[in-house]
Image (cartoon, rainbow, N blue to C red):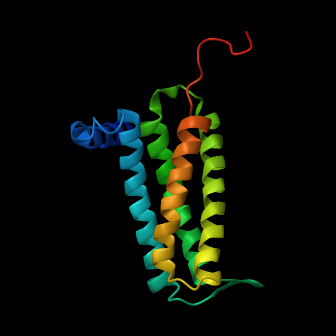
Amino acid sequence: MHSVHRFLKKSILFIIDLFYPLFRRIFSLQTFRYVACGGVNTLLDISLFAVNYHLIFRKHNVVIGTVTVSPHIASLWLAFCITLPIGYYLNRYVVFQELGLKRRVQLFRFILVTFLCIGLNYILLKLFVDYMGWYPTPSKVLTTIFVAAFSYITQAFVFFKKQDAVNPMG
């Protein structure tokens, strides 16, 4: 399993880093890796959302026991179940690999950011689709732009920020 993981990680880094020279004046390497990994995962998320909404749920409410869920919210959750582990893997092993945080700490931080993002996704989708009457897929794209900015800021500057070697307490 370790050899598969190592091969996958090296392959992803090779492909991403191959394009970095084109963007080195704009982004640091870590920011470029974040944008590349996040961009791919975001495209996957939006694609899954559209497939779920149009083909799986066919724009119909989903009844789960006694709860009825709108098709755009069901699509959001189903896409989330797939993109969460992919996003964690990419953040852990490609973007923020040099932090040296323990896996469980990084996983907890990633899940916390992810749940904040899924909450923001939910609120914005409800606002755009249910209250403003916009189409679900364009609403998801706009929502994703807001959530991606929020996610990057919280991950890069709060949750995955490198700790300084100097003790801040003196």
Left or right relative to 127: residue 97 = left
In front here: 65 or 163? 163
In front here: 97 or 25? 25
Please determine whether, in this image, residue 166 is positioned above or below residue 149.
above
Residue most toward the top? 170
User: Image point 46% across, 32% down: which residue?
Assistant: 97
Q: Position of residue 66 (x, y in %)?
A: 78, 85
The quarter in which the N terminus is drawn is top left
Left or right relative to 147: residue 31 = left
User: Image point 53% across, 85% down: which residue?
Assistant: 57
Left or right relative to 69: residue 154 = left
User: Image point 36% across, 33% down: which residue?
Assistant: 28
Q: Position of residue 170 (x, y in %)?
A: 73, 9
In front here: 39 or 134? 134
Q: Quadrant of residue 117?
A: bottom right
Q: Quadrant of residue 73?
A: bottom right
Q: Is residue 1 visible?
A: no
Q: Quadrant of residue 94?
A: top left
Q: Position of residue 56 (x, y in %)?
A: 49, 83
Q: How many numbered marks have been drawn onto this rendered protein structure?
A: 0
Q: Position of residue 65 (x, y in %)?
A: 74, 83
Q: Is residue 72 visible?
A: yes
Residue most toward the right? 66
Please determine whether, in this image, residue 49 is positioned above or below residue 108.
below
User: Image point 50% across, 63% down: which residue?
Assistant: 144
